[in-house]
Amino acid sequence: MNAEAEVLVEEIGGIGLVTLNRPKAINALTLGMVRSISAALTQWSASDGVSLVLIRGAGERGLCAGGDIRAIYEDLLSGNLRPAGFWREEYALNQMIADYAKPIVAVMNGIVMGGGIGLSAHASHRIVTETTTIAMPETSIGFLPDVGATYLLSRAPGESGTHLALTAGRVGAADALFLGLADFHIEMARLADLPKRLRDCRSAEDIEKQLLSLATPPSPGELESAQSWIDEAFSADTVEEICERLAARGEPEGLDDLQKIRGNSPTSLKIALRALRKGREFKKLAPCLAMELTVATHLMRSHDMREGVRAAVIDKDRKPKWSPARLEDVSDEAVEAYFSDSDLK
């Protein structure tokens, strides 16, 4: 095993252990990492010596901060189409995790964003800790919630998933459990016992029993108590109407959400709402991933994604100049064009 490898792959007592190993970059995903994880899962699926898979991140900062956005930005500037290839293989890995015949336990400690959600939230057993921050910042960088988020968030209670997507929000452990993105809260100090506890597990029921024995209640979250007004505001058919409802309510939380939404890409906001509504209609993950790939490939060529990444990650001035700059200037026809693959062949 090469300790400098971007992904460490081991077999320990019946456990297939995947460790994302770029701690200085909060384990941000590269194409090589996606391929290494896919290869390991493929091998273990046919191995009698592996009964379950455990996915974790090196270091204490987080499981994964998403895709390597700086590398993607360089490709966007040069017009290189590599990001589309990366997303295609990444989404295939997300589907593999969702369909995997053996249990997959994912440890969602620290920062879990974008691609990190794709690696963990589709697993059969998902652990959050007191350090967990799950973030969906895509509409703030001119992108859309992807890696199957249109499937996951559209199935969250009420409109809580829509709220998270449009505000480009972040949540802790309790809210992750409420949203259906996680299953167990286990304190960081107890995670050291995890491999030993899982070593003799031979079924999903065995794993659940062990995880429940380690689990503790998380600190209270915010979404469940706010669900009634979130549902009232975010059930609207358009982003404009959502904003109107938030403004009309006049509550501090709603006005805070309104300010966040107004700072995000108008195009991405409308695309995200449309994608979540379509995702709710789909019965399976696969069509959501296919839809996301089509939209992402269009967005890769757009002004707003380049500008959003520049403002948030490259220059860090937090002052993106969106085009169009106003919600009312983003037509329904323009939004629908992002969902068409006729010109991507």
Image (cartoon, rainbow, N blue to C red):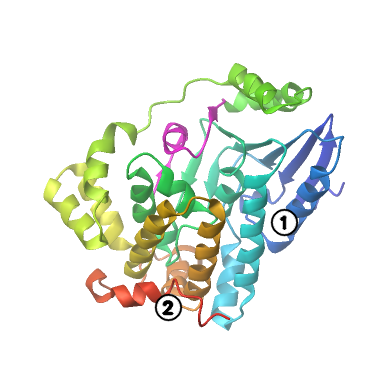
Is 188 part of what is drawn in magenta? no
Is disc 1 surrounded by few (<14), some (14 to 19) or many (20+) residues within 10 Å?
Answer: many
Q: Amino acid at mark 1?
A: Met
Whichever of callouts 1 and 2 sits on the residue coming sooner in the sequence is 1
Q: Quadrant of residue 79?
A: bottom right
Is disc 2 surrounded by few (<14), some (14 to 19) or many (20+) residues within 10 Å?
Answer: some
Q: Is residue 312 left or right of residue 251?
A: right
- Identify whether 167 is placed above or below 100: below
Q: Position of residue 230 (x, y in %)?
A: 26, 43
Q: Amino acid at mark 2?
A: His
**Which region shows up in magenta?**
169-186
Identity of the residue drawn at 16% across and 42% down: 251
- Identify whether 83 is placed above or below 169: below
Residue in front for this viewpoint, 89 or 136: 89
Query: Badge 2 is on which residue?
Result: 303
Q: Position of residue 67 (x, y in %)?
A: 59, 59
Query: Badge 1 is on which residue?
Result: 33
